[in-house]
Image (spheres, rainbow, N blue to C red):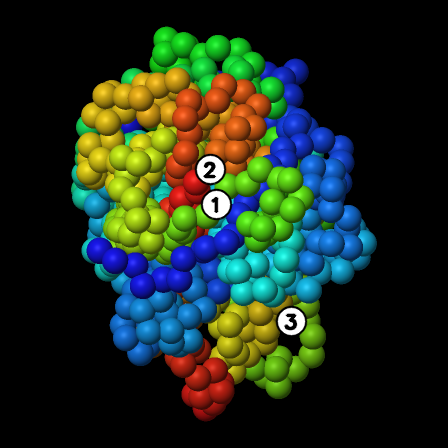
Amino acid sequence: MTQLLAKPRRKDPLQKTRAPLLPPGARSRTALGLTAAAAEGRFALQVCADCAAVIYPPRDACPRCLSPRLPFRDVPDGGVLLVETTIGASTDPYFRERLPWRIGTVRLDAGPSMVTHLHADLREGNRVRMTLQLDKSGQAVAMALPHQPTANMADDPQWRELTCDPKFRRVLVTDGRGAVGQAIAKALSDAEASIVFVGIADPWKPFPGEAALRQIARVEIVPLDLTDTVSVEDLAGEIGGRVDILVNTAEHVRPGGILARNGLVVAREEIELRYFGLMRLAQTFGAALRARGADGINSAVAFVNLLSVYALVNWSAYGAFSATEAACLSAAQSLRAELRPGGIKVVNVFAGPLDTDWYQTVPPPKVTPAALAAATVDALRRGLEDVYVGDVAEDIRARLAVNPKALERELGS
Amino acid sequence: MASSRMPYDGVVVAAPVTIPYRRYSINSAHWWIGRAVRGVLDRTGLRAGDIDGLSVSSFTMGPDTAIGLTQHFGLSPRWLDHIPLGGASGVVALRHAARAVQCGDADFVVCVAGDTNQVDSFRTMLSTFSRFAQDAVYPYGSGGPNASFAMIMRNYMTRYGPTREDFGKIAVAQRANALSFPHALMKKPLTLDAYMAARPIADPIHLFDCVMPCAGAEAFLVCREDAARDLGLPAARLLATIERHNAYADDAIQERGGWAVDIGELYAMAGITPDAVDFLETYDDYPVICMMQMEDLGFCAKGEGAAFVRGHTLTNDGSFPHNTSGGQLSVGQAGCAGGYLGLVEAVRQLTGAALGAAVPNARIGLVSGFGMITYDRGLASGAALLAG
């Protein structure tokens, strides 16, 4: 049984903050197929298109038939732990300060053997469930987990190194005026976040759900207006060094395409809140997040963007809005690169239309704020980087993978 | 079984050269390799112009390959080889060179291996050792070969039952051999108690199961037997060789090496049986690999390595002299030169030129090479039988 994680004690401000180091991140381009799978929480290996051999490590020629056609495909994740070792000496500085570190060799039901990180509850001969995870370097690694859940399973230090579990972490939800922000605050509190800061612009103005929000355990309302640089700076000055996970819940959904806007007023508001708001958050909280990537049990781990799936491809019914979301997605990609030296994950949660007022006329299926919140917490617990929530988002993703041009036409008609 | 291969008649190995190892060096691999080539010239009286064949093995001479060394050293060979096979480099270089000499493609082939070891160069080498290591091993705790061989050792212990004491006996005997070998970096006697009490590196591998990376170079000359005689060089004859790569790829964890595929042919080609071998030089990156070689080279059956080790004394004066200079475990692992160490030592023993304790009446020696763990197992293996 995994040792229960101890709640971190208040930090001694005189102690040096451990600087983040990254595990080895160099990979062949072919191996980045694993990274793509890990980002979405899929267990995919190369499967030979000619002879169906399942292949690992990643190759450019099939070791059975020399075929060069080796696409990554989801494969069964079961296996048996053949042998393990506990590393007590490492040449790499990242691992050196995390020793001892257990690895093992797993024989996959799908065929090949994998050298893998090991969950603490595993012993030789155990059935395992394999998963591909993004480590602090942002690249994929394999980890073997117990076949059946075990007690305190998520508290395993090697697993926690690969995830962004909210447990004992301090979270900032940037906008709590709406149903989404409130649902996210509730879900994070339920996930044992130690503080949930919830930003409210103009706190003197009442809003629906306020009473319930204030009732949520460990929620602390903070003044935050994402359209106001001074407001964001003030809050960062106060709590920036104590935010381990930032979830940007700011929404600005308005229907209509470019021609429907008739001027720039709405577009400006949209960009002010969504795109510039994201930049303000990144510029004020980003450096502290990056510096605290290895700061103990409650190290900084994630910057979460709630995005519309129409950031990936424009839906003309919400055309101007889609364009702003696309800008936010592009900024998130830049942030990913910029926060990586701290081992901070930038998590993009893509949802289709939500079951909220601004999508009133859109037919179902729609995503409820509670479902979006559950998916966000699940992504943090599993260490995902790209998440598609709900049937519409999954549908868009699938269509996009097959034929982006077709999807452009479909969404533009 | 009979061998259909052409014997290495008339080919000899001479001029064993070791450039004394150093833990760290500020010199380049080129410096170390150059000194070893010079050592062969000094020993043989040949001039650089006489060297018409060159075979080079090194991990740290980048960006150069063997061709760069010809200009660097002022050599103009008509036969050139580059063998980046780590622990199998010596045996493979020898068998290539032997055929070149035998066929007249070259008369005097200098085979040389050398590597430098600068502060932090070992870490750099591990992280870029192979594409599979980079993609699928090094990101997992970066334990290097220690972690990979720990899993091989643990599986071997579980499957066949040897204890740490059995591996300790191999390491302790090698240290005893090293105490009389002037170039060994490890000068302190090793007791079984100290072996057992050493700190864990990657369970079940502990400190004295591991080699120490260092800088150094080794070389020898391959030429015709009559040419060696004309130069007044004591030389060892080459009886037989084998080489095999990526054998038993379907074994989930490595329990045997490529020797097991070809061992019958090795003895058949030499026309001898294992009991005719007077001493064995295994590739000793870890004692478990020594034991695996004792099995796969036919001295005992698979799974009986521990009993074999228990039944013998492994020192130079013992019933089964093994790694007679102390091996890499006591001399140090100078990169690819580690794949030459046993071969160079065997030539010394067979030509009455042992630098340390001589194996009494050493007439036939078996040298084994093993190397290149690019993912989860050593891929390259080879062996050579030499006679004095």
Indicate the quadrant where residue A167 lies. Answer: top left
Name the kind of residue labelled 1 in the image: Arg
Quick one: SS at disc 2?
loop
Residue corresponding to mark 1: B237
Q: Is residue A199 left or right of residue A119?
A: right
> Between disc 2 and disc 1, whose residue precedes?
1
- Per the rendering, the mark at residue A267 is 3
| Residue drawn where x is 27% and y is 42% of the image | B273
Residue corresponding to mark 2: B388
- Please state, as top left, top right, bottom left or bottom right, where the N terminus of chain A lies in the image: top left
C-alpha span from label 2 to label 1: 6 Å
Indicate the quadrant where residue B300 lies. Answer: top left
Q: Chain of mark 3?
A: A
Quick one: SS at disc 3?
helix
Q: Is residue A269 visible?
A: no
Q: Chain of mark 1?
A: B
- Per the rendering, the mark at residue A294 is none
Q: Position of residue A326 (x, y in %)?
A: 58, 69
Q: Position of residue B98 (x, y in %)?
A: 52, 55
Residue B241 drawn above or below residue B217? below
Name the kind of residue labelled 3 in the image: Ala
Q: Residues within 10 Å of mark 2 (few under 14, many from 20)?
A: many
| Residue drawn where x is 24% and y is 20% of the image | B310
Asked whether the residues under the numbered discs 2 and 3 touch, taking CB atoms below 8 Å apart as contact, a structural biologist would say no
C-alpha span from label 3 to label 1: 87 Å
Asked whether the residues under the numbered discs 2 and 1 touch, taking CB atoms below 8 Å apart as contact, a structural biologist would say yes
Question: Which numbered disc, 2 or 3, marks the residue closer to the eye?
Answer: 2
C-alpha span from label 2 to label 3: 90 Å
Quick one: SS at disc 1?
strand
